Amino acid sequence: MLNSVNLKIADTVIRMQSGFPIKPLSEEDLKLESPERFNSFFYKGGRKPDILIDIKVVKKLPKFSGKVIFITTHFQDGSENWRLLKRGSAYIYKSPLDEKKQVAVVSKDFKRADVYLLPKRSKDFVWETSDIIYDFLQVLLINYFAFHKKGIFTHSAGIRDIDDRGYLFNGKSGAGKSTTARIWYKHSKAKVLNDDRIIIRKMKGKFFIYGSPWHGDFSDYLVSRSDSALLDKIFFIHHAKLNRVQPIEESEAFSLLYPNLFPTFWDKSCLENIVSFSLDLIKNIRCLKMGFVNNKNIISFIRKQKGGLSNV
């Protein structure tokens, strides 16, 4: 008997299935894991899954070898978070983190994955949805969207305003993405999609922004944000003494956007797809540099910005 869970992220259905049982969350788990941050992404519709993940709980992780193509490390102490290897036409994902040690074998089109997990502290052969969502699923989706030319991940805050217009606030760490999310959450009826991880997709010739389960510093809004919005403008933000916007050319917009993407350095064709998508995006969506003051006045200031879907 298979135990399965379906997720829907950025209009992409992911099925996680296993012959091993899913661990029920205790009251203590609920406090520690904060599952509400991704509850809205569970999917109960009848669509066929775009991605299938098979989960196996094992006593010992298999030792798959391959050529190391990428390693991520923690920004504070330099310890390894995860690594990606190439093995023939497949990819190998490995995480060495305590309580999250896992290995995954991923197909070359990123539509299938076999994930191997170790038993929990209880020694029970069970698994949890969070075992996959953090952080393997994010890595898988970054590659999946790039490979299939379906979209990009950005370090951005995303807002769906009361008139359904979508605003993307892009910037490096400390630029004010989480601050922006808090202002809109506290002082408007707009929906905050996410304060740090926004997925952008092009559907029927139009660009949409989608919330994701992965977030930054601000978490008050995370009860349910699997929503999307038609993208109206992109703001490249920084803190300032006055609220001010400046239209920019496509070349400058790309130079500001690219450092805040999740480029697949290990795959040339996927990287080219990300660059091509980004160039199409900034060509068709109005891009503005914006300095802003940390107060609610920025909301009305942004709503007054006019202009169609093109750069000046």
Image: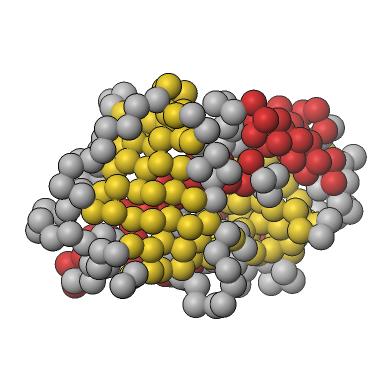
Q: Tell me what residue is drawn at x 71 percent, y 36 percent.
A: 273
Residue nearest the viewer, comparing 87 with 137: 87
Which residue reaches farthest left? Answer: 122
The picture places residue 217, in percent across and down from the top left corner, at 42, 49
The picture places residue 234, in percent across and down from the top left corner, at 72, 47
Residue nearest the viewer, comparing 283 with 148: 148
The picture places residue 221, in percent across and down from the top left corner, at 46, 65
Q: Answer above or below: position of 286 versus 182.
A: above
Q: Is residue 171 left or right of residue 285?
A: left
Q: Quadrant of the C terminus?
A: top right
Q: Tell me what residue is drawn at x 38 percent, y 63 percent.
A: 17
The colour mode here is secondary structure
Q: Answer above or below: position of 31 versus 146.
A: below
Q: Is residue 153 left or right of residue 137?
A: right
Q: Quadrant of the N terminus?
A: bottom left
Q: Tell me what residue is drawn at x 69 percent, y 53 percent.
A: 201
Q: Quadrant of residue 166?
A: bottom right
Q: Residue 256, can we see it?
A: no
The picture places residue 197, in percent across and down from the top left corner, at 53, 49
Q: Quadrant of residue 75?
A: top left
